[in-house]
């Protein structure tokens, strides 16, 4: 008898956002990405929050260090490991370039039509990512229906909101922001 089951893995806290783990990360992109610029702002209580703006927004260089600003893509995905719809934010240029090349490739086309596997290896400055497309296949109808029913609002990221919030939660968030 072993202390823990042989196939036991410590759960990764995935929540509503997909993060690349070491090894293979298989997912299906469910929406076109929103794109823009992102940096982190420290609040008075010491916590940090991301600030995201559209590509055409002028970055306030008087209050933001341009070296900390990153280009991002954010999209809805089906994460096969977590078996749930999540938001994947991609800031790694190597991954962006690979997916862009696939999307423009006549043989592959839109990555909405096939799964992708991003393999992560290494640590810190030595981290590398490999992007591998899988043969095109129809998305499971149950996943597609779940995605449609969720009505994910990626544009809420530009406003610091929750893309998964229901309509009543969005109204409460707006009211809270107005009072802040």
Image (tube, rainbow, N blue to C red):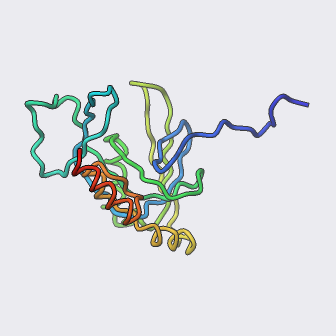
Q: Position of residue 95 (x, y in %)?
A: 37, 45
Count of numbered circles in the view: 0
Tell which of 57 and 80 is nearer to you: 57
Residue 105, by quadrant, is bottom left
Say left or right for 27 vs 158: right
The answer to whether residue 108 is visible is no
Residue ID at (31%, 41%)? 93
Q: Residue furthest front?
A: 179
Q: Position of residue 108 (x, y in %)?
A: 40, 64
Residue 46, by quadrant, is top left
Say left or right for 6 vs 13: right
Q: Quadrant of the N terminus?
A: top right
Say left or right for 41 vs 9: left
Q: Position of residue 42 (x, y in %)?
A: 27, 29
The answer to whether residue 74 is visible is yes
Q: Position of residue 157 (x, y in %)?
A: 30, 52
Tell which of 6 and 93 is nearer to you: 6
Q: Is residue 91 above or below residue 88?
A: above
Q: Residue furthest right?
A: 1
Q: Quadrant of the C terminus?
A: top left
Say left or right for 81 vs 180: right
Residue ID at (27%, 31%)? 43
Residue ID at (16%, 28%)? 65
Residue ID at (56%, 39%)? 23
Q: Is residue 82 above or below residue 103?
A: above
């Amino acid at each position: 008898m072993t202390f823990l089951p042989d196939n036991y893995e410590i759960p990764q806290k995935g929540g509503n956002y997909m993060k690349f783990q070491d090894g293979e990360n298989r997912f299906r992109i469910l929406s076109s990405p929103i794109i823009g610029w992102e940096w982190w702002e420290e609040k008075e209580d010491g916590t940090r929050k991301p600030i995201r703006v559209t590509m055409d927004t002028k970055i306030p260089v008087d209050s933001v260090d341009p070296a900390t600003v990153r280009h991002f893509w954010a999209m809805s995905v089906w994460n096969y490991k977590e078996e749930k719809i999540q938001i994947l934010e991609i800031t790694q240029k190597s991954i962006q370039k690979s997916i862009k090349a696939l999307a423009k490739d006549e043989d592959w086309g839109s990555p909405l039509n096939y799964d992708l596997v991003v393999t992560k290896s290494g640590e810190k400055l030595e981290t590398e990512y490999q992007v591998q497309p899988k043969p095109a296949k129809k998305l499971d109808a149950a996943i597609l229906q779940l995605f449609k029913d969720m009505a994910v609002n990626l544009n809420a990221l530009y406003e610091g909101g929750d893309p998964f919030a229901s309509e009543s939660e969005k109204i409460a968030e707006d009211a809270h922001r107005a009072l802040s």
